């Protein structure tokens, strides 16, 4: 893998923005909530600007890893501070920046323990950013846990519905995942005999025997799979999402679950390609079960957040299916789907958060006629739902299309099942739209105000992103190509040949 | 020349003598005792730091002064200093016994310093007993005499039992090899460790140290003693005493050589049982100190993984783990002492609303608890990473997997502590714990140490490596 070092450490700058934001928030006395919110908005806005810059400035012609920063950290163990981005991590960085910023704006109305909320939120996002740009296994693991443990307090303090149960379940499940990841990392480092945690060095072909790859891949897949909501380890996900406050649901479903599939990709697939090919049928089967199960379980839900929670299980199944196809199309679709689903879910939770804040309910039977009571809020919700169904010209459509094409080629039965599940999910999403946004108006809610312009800003940003990448999927696919083609053995120059 | 290398021990001996004299004066002055003890302990830390590069063999070669021992003496004196710093409100001990309390703390520290330098079976045994006897009496000093005596008696009985077993092991070891110097044993043991007699002798000998470390099957005393002892003393037992046990275990286990033997398997079994028992029992505890006791038992299991690797990496990891335990456990007990200002035993419910009453203390407690649970970027995570990495280099994949699952189990009760401090609101409004300016500074320093050492441990790992190089 080619390495291109950075002149200015943009990636570290992103982390420093989070760190400086965190410190500033900690130092502001808690009786200045408005100031804390502004600091959060500026800090998260800066990270968004930086991640957009990095996305644009990445040289797709060169490919490889760019913006690389590398310093020794713990020499006796071969641990380095090693960051860099490629076509897989850039979409994720961009996604994190978008969701982080809009997540702060969506929580503008927060009044309870504002300082602690934003401090923990910054810590969480710092972990996410670090993980996406990290290239040293030690740091990847550290960031993984940094992004998880603020979650417990974020859900348990600021959440709703069964929040303490949801928080505990989520934390234990996700850290059970890390109980598989850490041994896998240490195992690979130990058997490589190289005394290094450097991901790039460890991806050298022929370093691990097929058996070692199969074992380590299984551990990594299960460990990260818990976070990615792979069936049957998904049960924490709907419960956790429902319990979490709006901003946290956004980051959690939008970004954190992607850490899971990104981990499978970055660690599992990069380090153990043999293991990947060996376990691909298992991955595909679990993914399809997840897709079908998520769609069917969603049909029965009456709580809006549960609906989105189960649809996340279904959509993350599509990501898993894409990864399982071991093909360029599948990888492109999977990473694109990670991005698209992230933005879409953020929009979903952001609009539900607004609806809940006003109506104090997220039960579908109690809502109705929202499109007349608060037309703007309903519009955002409907756009999210349509994206979720996979309506053309919205980002998810292309991602799902690519995955399904690849899947039908490699696993025809799985592919057909997955496509048919999409029909079910379309059915239940349309039913939800019909029941909440149309139909008779709930009289007790008729007086509620619509989203003000300033409040709709985060949702507008998310909609714009969805539409932008829906109309110009090439922006994203070209980027992912630069990583997926070399990963499957092609050189960077073959990129153009795949999609002429 | 010889006495220079012996300065830390002499210093602590002199301090103990001074408190013997103070305890005989008629006037009871707790402030005076506290300030004398604090300045002496601070001086002790400086003396130990100054002597860290000393080297030599003393007393007919039964006493080895090397970087390994001196580093542990620094840790011990640091533990003593921290614990004494908590004694400004020593309400768990009757007022007239305060100077005796400090006296015994100093003799106990002295004994543990002797222990980490001993390289002869008899000197190891004698120093171990000296430290244990100091602790038996200390536990009985609890103001609530019935509680203290009961705990002390239990501690004493199990201690005597384990030291009898250890003596038996020592005798068998001598019978099998005819040697008493560790430096001689290290030549002979690796060749004969597979003989049943030698194996039994080594395992029984280690029993004495397992008692100190509160490792299965010698862990039964820990919950009762933690609860029965004055809070400050429980902090001392949980920190300094454990550090000394890690040091001596490292020395003795290293003397058995590093080969794949039945010994490793039996130690691995003990480690697994210990962490599982500790973690499962901790899940249902309501008393904060009892919970910490069971968590100590589990932590002892993790440390043992580093020790049983019998490799330089494993020894580094165990040394680092000892430091981590010192900081993490001390921070937890800092919270215990401050919450139970009357010297009683706080329950988990007493933590309710701590985030409002004292945000700093709540933050320190949360960081310490996350460190104990091994969540990065804290010192506890780095310690676990080092231990597991050393075990993995030896190929103990299953052992690491079991240990990691234990970590997940333990997370549940650690999160209960966080939940108690951050989520639960107290039923009755309880007064905020009083933190003086120096206590605030100490708490802040501990938080910073837990995070910074966890995130950038390189200098300490380098030092641990230098220290462990004399073992192998």
Image (spheres, rainbow, N blue to C red):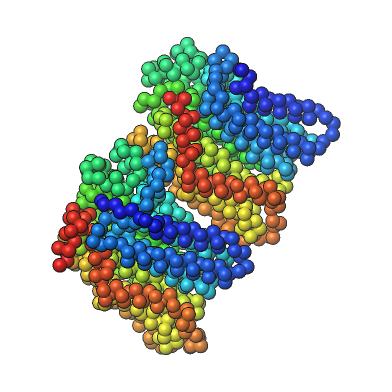
Closer-to-camera residue (B260/A60) = A60
- Residue A368 seen in this snapshot: no
Q: Height in image: B248 above or below A42? A: above
Q: Residue at x 57, y 70 (%)?
A: A35
In the rendered image, the residue lying farthest to the front is A7
Residue A174 located left or right of residue A293: right
Q: For residue B22, what is the image quadrant?
A: top right
* Foreground of the two, B366 or A80: A80
Question: Which residue occupies the foreground of this view, B317 or A97?
Answer: A97
Q: Does residue B322 appear in the picture of this structure? A: yes
Q: Position of residue A349 (x, y in %)?
A: 42, 72
Q: From the viewer's perspective, is A492 left or right of B314?
A: left
Count of number-bearing discs: 0
Considering depth in this image, is A237 or A3 the residue closer to the camera? Answer: A3
Question: Where does the image place residue A123, in percent across and percent down from the top left?
Answer: 48, 58
Where residue B255 appears, as percent x and y from the top left, is 45, 22
Q: Residue at x 40, y 30 (%)?
A: B311
Quadrant housing the C terminus of chain A: bottom left
Judged from this view, the residue extending furthest toward the right is B26
Q: Residue at x 35, y 27 (%)?
A: B260
Would residue A485 appear left or right of A313 to someone viewing this image? left
| Residue at figure coordinates x 49%, y 51% from the top left | B412
Q: In the figure, A140 relative to A249: above or below?
A: above
Based on the displayed image, in which of its 4 quarters is residue B45 positioned? top right
Estimate the x, y position of residue B204 in percent, counting from the top left. Answer: 49, 23
Q: Is residue A9 above or below residue B288?
A: below
């Amino acid at each position: 893998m080619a390495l291109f070092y950075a002149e200015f450490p943009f990636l570290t700058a992103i982390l420093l923005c989070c760190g400086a934001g965190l410190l500033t928030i900690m130092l502001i006395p808690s009786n200045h909530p408005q100031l804390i919110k502004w600091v959060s908005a500026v800090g998260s806005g800066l990270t968004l600007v930086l991640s957009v810059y990095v996305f644009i400035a990445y040289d797709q012609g060169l490919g490889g890893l760019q913006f690389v920063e590398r310093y020794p950290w713990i020499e006796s163990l071969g641990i380095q501070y090693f960051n860099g981005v490629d076509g897989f991590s850039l979409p994720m960085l961009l996604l994190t920046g978008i969701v982080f910023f809009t997540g702060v704006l969506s929580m503008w109305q927060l009044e309870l323990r504002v300082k602690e909320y934003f401090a923990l939120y910054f810590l969480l996002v710092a972990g996410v950013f670090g993980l996406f740009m990290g290239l040293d296994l030690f740091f990847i693991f550290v960031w993984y846990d940094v992004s998880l443990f603020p979650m417990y307090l974020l859900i348990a303090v600021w959440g709703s519905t069964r929040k303490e149960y949801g928080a505990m379940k989520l934390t234990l499940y996700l850290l059970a995942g890390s109980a598989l990841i850490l041994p896998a990392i240490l195992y690979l480092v130990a058997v490589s005999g190289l005394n290094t945690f450097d991901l790039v060095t460890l991806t050298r072909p022929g370093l691990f025997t097929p058996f070692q790859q199969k074992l380590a891949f299984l551990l990594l897949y299960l460990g990260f799979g818990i976070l990615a909501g792979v069936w049957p380890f998904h049960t924490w996900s709907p419960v956790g999402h429902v319990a979490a406050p709006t901003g946290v649901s956004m980051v959690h479903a939008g970004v954190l679950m992607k850490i899971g599939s990104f981990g499978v990709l970055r660690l599992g697939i990069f380090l153990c390609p043999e293991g990947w090919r060996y376990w691909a049928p298992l991955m595909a089967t679990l993914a399809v079960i997840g897709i079908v199960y998520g769609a069917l379980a969603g049909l029965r839900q009456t709580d809006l957040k549960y609906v989105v929670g189960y649809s996340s299980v279904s959509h993350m199944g599509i990501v898993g299916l894409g990864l399982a196809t071991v093909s360029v199309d599948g990888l492109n679709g999977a990473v694109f789907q990670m991005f698209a689903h992230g933005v879409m879910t953020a929009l979903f939770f952001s609009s539900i958060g607004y609806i809940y804040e006003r109506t104090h309910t997220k039960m579908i039977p109690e809502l109705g006629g929202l499109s007349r009571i608060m037309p703007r809020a309903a519009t955002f919700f409907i756009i999210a739902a349509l994206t979720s169904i996979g309506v053309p010209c919205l980002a998810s459509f292309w991602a799902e299309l690519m995955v399904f094409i690849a899947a039908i080629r490699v696993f025809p039965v799985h592919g057909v099942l997955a496509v048919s599940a999409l029909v079910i999910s379309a059915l239940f999403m349309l039913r939800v739209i019909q029941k909440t946004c149309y139909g008779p108006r709930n009289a007790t809610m008729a007086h509620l105000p619509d989203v003000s312009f300033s409040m709709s800003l985060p949702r507008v940003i998310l909609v714009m992103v969805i539409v932008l990448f829906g109309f110009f999927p090439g922006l994203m696919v070209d980027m992912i190509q630069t990583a997926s083609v070399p990963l499957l053995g092609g050189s960077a120059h073959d990129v153009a040949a795949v999609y002429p | 020349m010889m006495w220079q290398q012996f300065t830390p021990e002499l210093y602590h001996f002199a301090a103990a003598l001074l408190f013997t004299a103070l305890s005989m004066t008629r006037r009871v002055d707790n402030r005076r005792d506290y300030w004398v003890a604090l300045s002496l302990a601070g001086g002790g830390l400086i003396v130990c730091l100054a002597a860290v590069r000393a080297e030599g063999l003393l007393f007919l070669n039964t006493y080895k002064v090397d970087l390994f021992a001196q580093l542990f003496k620094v840790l011990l004196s640091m533990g003593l200093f921290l614990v004494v710093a908590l004694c400004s409100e020593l309400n768990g001990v009757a007022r007239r016994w305060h100077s005796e309390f400090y006296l015994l703390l100093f003799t106990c520290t002295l004994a543990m310093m002797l222990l980490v330098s001993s390289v002869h079976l008899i000197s190891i045994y004698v120093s171990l007993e000296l430290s244990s006897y100091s602790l038996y009496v200390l536990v009985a000093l609890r103001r609530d005499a019935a509680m203290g005596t009961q705990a002390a008696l239990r501690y004493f009985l199990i201690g005597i039992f384990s030291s009898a077993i250890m003596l038996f092991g020592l005798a068998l070891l001598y019978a099998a090899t005819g040697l008493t110097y560790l430096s001689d044993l290290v030549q002979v043991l690796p060749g004969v460790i597979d003989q049943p007699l030698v194996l039994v002798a080594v395992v029984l000998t280690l029993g004495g140290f397992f008692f100190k470390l509160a490792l299965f099957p010698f862990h039964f005393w820990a919950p009762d003693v933690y609860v029965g002892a004055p809070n400050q003393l429980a902090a001392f037992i949980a920190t300094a005493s454990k550090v000394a046990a890690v040091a001596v275990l490292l020395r003795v286990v290293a003397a058995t050589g590093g080969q794949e033997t039945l010994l490793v398997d039996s130690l691995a079994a003990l480690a697994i049982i210990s962490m599982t028992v500790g973690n499962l029992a901790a899940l249902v505890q309501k008393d904060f100190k009892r919970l910490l006791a069971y968590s100590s038992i589990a932590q002892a299991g993790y440390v043992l993984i580093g020790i049983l690797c019998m490799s330089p990496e494993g020894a580094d990891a165990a040394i680092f783990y000892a430091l981590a335990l010192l900081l993490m456990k001390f921070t937890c007990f800092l919270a215990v002492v401050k919450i139970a200002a009357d010297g009683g035993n706080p329950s988990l419910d007493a933590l309710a609303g701590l985030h409002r009453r004292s945000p700093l203390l709540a933050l320190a407690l949360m960081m310490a608890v996350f460190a104990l649970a091994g969540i990065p970027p804290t010192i506890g995570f780095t310690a676990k990473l080092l231990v597991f990495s050393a075990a993995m280099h030896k190929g103990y994949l299953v052992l690491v997997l079991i240990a990691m699952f234990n970590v997940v189990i333990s997370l549940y009760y650690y999160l209960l502590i966080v939940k108690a401090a951050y989520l639960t609101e107290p039923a009755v409004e309880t007064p905020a714990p009083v933190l003086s300016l120096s206590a605030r500074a100490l708490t802040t320093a501990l938080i910073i140490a837990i995070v910074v050492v966890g995130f950038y441990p390189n200098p300490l790992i380098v030092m641990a490596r230098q220290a462990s190089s004399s073992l192998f």
